[in-house]
């Protein structure tokens, strides 16, 4: 789950990371009021769950409350990378002298969290990572020992941070690590962490990703989920406990089990097709779950054929067949359906489907070939 900038910074503040004064607004009038409260220059920041808002025009400086209102009106009417802006954060503008990058994430290869810092912080850290990776310094954190003070000093030295800031920088590193750890985050990032004209360190931007599998023990975080800002398909999938990832191809795949789903995608590619999604309906899926999954697949306009690969164990073939029929009643479609159904209650399932003008197959290879052929015909 992605958190908004304002949510991430609120969490950071609990860990004694200094953030600018400010509040979030849903209307331009509110933005003006906040600007009046703060006094002086403010920055109006679109709250959308994408990066690079600055470059896309979603972050603007306002000199007075009047300007704050005007800019908020503009930004609240914008779409950023396809997402409508529904809220803006109004922060006291920072007097920025330097922009530093500081982040912590999981390094799967090292099987440890890693904290990264760079003096080349700001808007283009991905570019820095690509073009001049030597400008990014890393320390791996032993999960049992936690972040050690010498490691934060290593980072500070690595990015040539002036000595005067080392104490504060160490405190911010420890705060960020604690925020990452205690909230089951997969990413906690400050970009930029700035040095201000008053020689203070300040977290101007914040980003956190929370591990969905850890959300059950963070009711406060789960509440922060902004459904408005997420893709409708993902919301729908989560509601039904489906694992759905949209891809760019044209063959929709409905499979029970993640491993089988991957194998199915491989076979589709092997026969010259491109999967439109990864979808795992899970073990023992009921008819309504299957129906929801099929609606999801068919909502993708790229889909030219749907391949069902159901291996009945706990999942029953007749339940799956019923789900398909229910979904087909709701969603009228001409998209060809190719079904490979084997295992528990497969004959019953096939009997239910027999009248429904569906293409059946006995092996996965046959089903994949038929699906690929169907996309080529259409
Ligand atoms: P992002 O583009 O989505 O990463 O949004 P950021 O919050 O990181 O803002 C992008 C850039 O806008 C920052 O790197 C800064 O250069 C600039 N910026 C953001 N807030 C302020 C501010 O308070 N004052 C000034 N002068 N610049 C800011
Ligand atoms: Mn940023």
Image: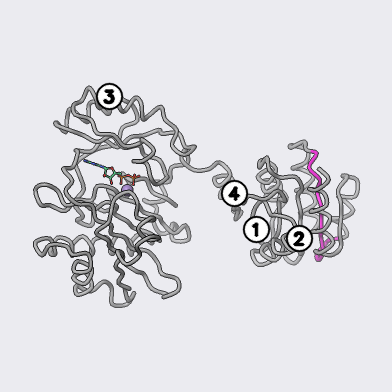
Q: Residue at x 21, y 72 (%)?
A: 154
Which of the pair 360/62 is nearer the observer?
62
Give the labeled residue for mark 3. 69
Determine crowd level at label 2: few under 14, some 14-19, many 20+ residues with C-alpha closer than 10 A. many
**Real-space Cα separation, disc 4 to disc 2, in angstroms:** 18 Å
Tell me the quadrant of the picture where the C terminus can be found: top right
User: Of callouts 3 and 4, which one flags the residue occurring earlier in the amino acid sequence?
Assistant: 3
Q: Secondary structure at mark 3?
A: helix
Along the line of sight, the residue nearer the viewer: 77 or 238: 77
Residue, disc 4: 237
Q: Could you tell me which secondary element the residue under label 1 belongs to?
A: strand
Q: Tell which tag, 2 or 3, sits nearer the viewer.
A: 3
Kind of element beneath mark 2? strand
Residue 64 found in image quarter: top left
In the image, residue 235 sits, relative to residue 142, either above or below, namely: above
Seen at 40% across and 40% down, the residue is 48
Identify the mark nearer the N-term, 2 or 3: 3
Mark-to-mark CA distance, 2 and 3: 55 Å
Left or right: 98 in relation to 89: left
Does 299 appear above or below 200? above
| Image x and y of residue 362, in percent | 86, 63
Label 2: which residue?
Answer: 310
């Amino acid at each position: 789950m992605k958190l908004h900038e304002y949510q991430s910074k609120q969490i950071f503040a609990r860990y004694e990371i200094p953030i600018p004064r400010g509040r979030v607004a849903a209307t331009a009038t509110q933005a003006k009021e906040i600007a009046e409260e703060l006094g002086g220059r403010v920055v109006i920041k679109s709250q959308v769950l994408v990066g690079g808002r600055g470059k896309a025009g979603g972050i603007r400086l306002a000199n007075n409350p009047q300007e704050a209102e005007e800019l908020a009106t503009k930004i609240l009417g914008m779409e950023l990378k396809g997402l409508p802006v529904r809220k803006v954060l109004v922060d006291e503008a920072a007097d920025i002298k330097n922009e530093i990058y500081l982040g912590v994430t999981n390094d799967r290869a090292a099987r440890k969290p890693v904290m990264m810092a760079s003096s080349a912080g700001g808007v283009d850290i991905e570019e820095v990572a690509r073009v001049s990776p030597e400008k990014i310094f890393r320390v791996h954190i032993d999960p049992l020992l936690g972040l050690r003070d010498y490691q934060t000093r290593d980072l500070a030295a690595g990015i040539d941070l002036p000595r005067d800031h080392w104490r504060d920088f160490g405190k911010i590193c420890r705060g960020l690590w604690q925020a990452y750890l205690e909230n089951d985050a997969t990413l906690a990032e400050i970009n930029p962490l700035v040095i201000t004209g008053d020689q203070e360190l300040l977290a101007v931007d914040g980003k956190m990703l929370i591990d969905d599998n850890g959300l059950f023990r963070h009711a406060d975080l789960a509440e922060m989920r902004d459904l408005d800002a997420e893709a409708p398909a993902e919301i729908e999938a989560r509601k039904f406990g489906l694992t759905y990832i949209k891809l760019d191809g044209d063959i929709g795949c409905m499979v029970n089990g993640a491993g089988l789903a991957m194998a199915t995608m491989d076979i589709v590619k092997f026969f010259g097709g491109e999967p439109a999604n990864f979808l795992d309906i899970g073990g023992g899926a009921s008819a309504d779950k299957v129906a929801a999954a099929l609606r999801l697949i068919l909502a993708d306009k790229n889909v030219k054929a749907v391949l069902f690969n159901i291996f009945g164990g706990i999942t029953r073939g007749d339940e799956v067949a019923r789900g398909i029929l229910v979904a087909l009643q709701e969603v009228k479609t001409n998209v060809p359906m190719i079904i490979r159904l084997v295992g528990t209650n497969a004959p019953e399932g096939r009997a239910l489907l027999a009248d429904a003008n569906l293409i059946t197959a006995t092996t996965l290879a046959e089903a994949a070939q038929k699906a690929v052929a169907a996309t080529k015909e259409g």
